[in-house]
Image (cartoon, rainbow, N blue to C red):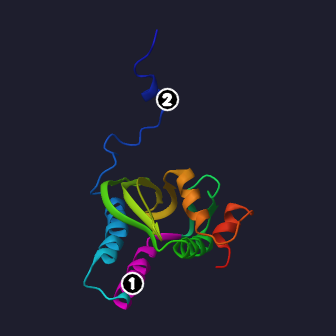
Amino acid sequence: MYDNNLLDKMTVPIGRNALLSETHPNALWLADLYRGGAEITADPGLGEQERLRRHQEHISEVMKRMSPDFVIHTGGVRLAATGGMDFLRRYTKRRAGLADANVEPIGFDQILADDHYGIVHGTFRTSRGDWTWTRVGMGAWRFKDGVAVEHWELSDGPTWDEFFLAGDPAAFTGSAEEFWTHGV
């Protein structure tokens, strides 16, 4: 006979109200991270120097809630890589160099979080030359003590690889980590 309460008996209760929420402090931080950057990018009244200054200011503020031991899991299949904060800095610089417009958030369906995890579901655009790649994607986040400690980029992996590999002028044969840190 099946015991309907078996799961309750087997697990340690974490609280019945521990649901992902858009008003949780971690969700509000994620919303500022994504929406704040998108607003700066989309503001037609900003000159290039002011846009760059505001982006740097925004990133500096966001980084205050990221662990120095932060881990990123990049998008892609062939180009999927995992690394720490130094890798993240080099990766974002290299990724930006392989596109005219890096991963730009266009709109968000949901940004939810609790004490432990967060999820961002939205539409993103990346372009280079005549190729504009618009897609629905997600970002998953892990938090510990109110600080972001881990992030997963969730996108169409094969297209991610195709887009970024095509932006590299040389045929690359190394590892994903070597690809993302090459020249930066």
Where residue 164 appears, x then y in whole percent? Answer: 57, 64
- Residue type at mark 1 is Glu
Left or right: residue 78 versus residue 135 is right
Residue 56 on image: x %, y %: 42, 83
Residue 17: % across, % down: 31, 44
Mark 2 and mark 1: span between their CA atoms? 47 Å
Which residue type does callout 2 highlight?
Answer: Met
Which quarter of the figure has residue 37?
Answer: bottom left
Q: Nearer the viewer, residue 18 or 121?
A: 121
The residue at the far front in this view is: 130
- Provide the residue span drawn in magenta: 49-67
**Label 2's element?**
helix
The residue drawn where x is 46% and y is 37% is: 12
Of residues 153 and 48, which is closer to you in this image? 48
Classify 70 as above or below 4: below
Q: Which mark is residue 57?
A: 1
Q: Residue furthest top?
A: 1
Q: Is residue 17 left or right of residue 168?
A: left
Q: At numbered mark 1, what does the secondary structure look like: helix, strand or loop?
A: helix
User: Is 70 part of what is drawn in magenta?
Assistant: no
Judging depth in this view, the residue of 137 and 12 nearest the camera is: 137
**Among the two numbered marks 2 and 1 on one chain, the one whose residue lies closer to the N terminus:** 2
Question: Residue 132 vs residue 158: left or right?
Answer: left
Considering the whole magenta stretch, tell me its main secondary structure: helix
The residue at the far bottom in this view is: 49
Q: Which residue is mark 2?
A: 10
The quadrant in which the C terminus is found is bottom right
Image x and y of residue 79, in percent: 63, 58
Depicted 109 relative to depicted 169: above or below: above
Question: Residue at 39% across / 88% down in the picture?
Answer: 53
